[in-house]
Amino acid sequence: MVAKKRVLVPLAPGFEELEAIAVIDYLRRAGAHVVTASVDAPNPITGRNRVRIMADIDLSEALEEWGEEWDLVVLPGGPGVARLAESETLAGLLSRRLGAGGLTGAICAAPRVLAAAGLPVATRITNHPGCRDDLADFTSYTTEAVAIDGPVITSRGPGTAVAFALALVEALYGADAAAALRAETVAA
């Protein structure tokens, strides 16, 4: 039996609900073991639009239980990105992951957390137009809905959340799995 791919989705108060839920839903549909982890906040975690989600576990507990053995780490955007950026635990995980070429995704304002964790400025990257200045140093910045540069996948915002989720599915499970989910969910 093949072990399920393990995915970590850190959540902080103010996370963008559509970005988090689309990623969690599509990756679970694809067969991933998705773990939502609260970052320095008690459950339930309240999103940007007051949707409350019970995280599976606290980030520090998730790292104690599974270490850094994640097939993918995905950061949703929204105002909660400020709290994600303040977490030394998350910054350390991301820095080591980026250095080792681990599959990592970020959407909306969250790519700035990757930048702070040491993402090379030549990485092809995108983010929410309102946060463009946060990535002004990135020489391969694009305005495409989803940018893929090796193991780094970034996206623009809530309206691109499904395309982003499908790109993550494809990175983990291949084009056929992503196409099947696109058809199943009638995604554009």
Image (cartoon, rainbow, N blue to C red):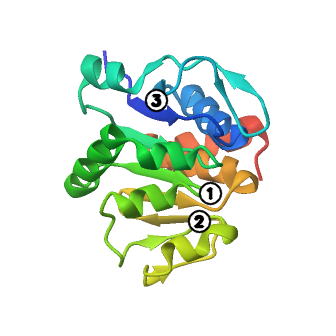
The answer to whether marks 1 and 2 mark residues whose Cβ atoms lie closer than 8 Å is yes
User: Viewed as shown, does residue 3 lie left or right of 146?
Assistant: left
User: Mark 3 or mark 2: which comes first in sequence?
Assistant: 3
The answer to whether one can see residue 54 in this image is: yes
Disc 1 residue crowd, few under 14, some 14–19, many 20+, Cα 10 Å: many
Q: Secondary structure at mark 2?
A: loop
Q: How many marks on residues?
A: 3
Amino acid at circle 2: Asn
Q: Secondary structure at mark 3?
A: loop
Front position among marks 1 and 3: 3
Q: Which residue is mark 2?
A: 127
The answer to whether marks 3 and 2 mark residues whose Cβ atoms lie closer than 8 Å is no
- Where residue 185 appears, as percent x and y from the top left, is 75, 37
The answer to whether marks 1 and 3 mark residues whose Cβ atoms lie closer than 8 Å is no
Q: Secondary structure at mark 1?
A: loop
**In the image, what residue occupies the spot 25% across and 31% down?**
69
**In the image, what residue occupies the spot 30% across and 63% down?**
118
- Where residue 17 appears, as percent x and y from the top left, is 70, 37
The image's mark for residue 40 is 3
The answer to whether one can see residue 174 in this image is: no
Q: Nearer the viewer, residue 6 or 8?
A: 8
Q: Nearer the viewer, residue 121 or 25?
A: 121
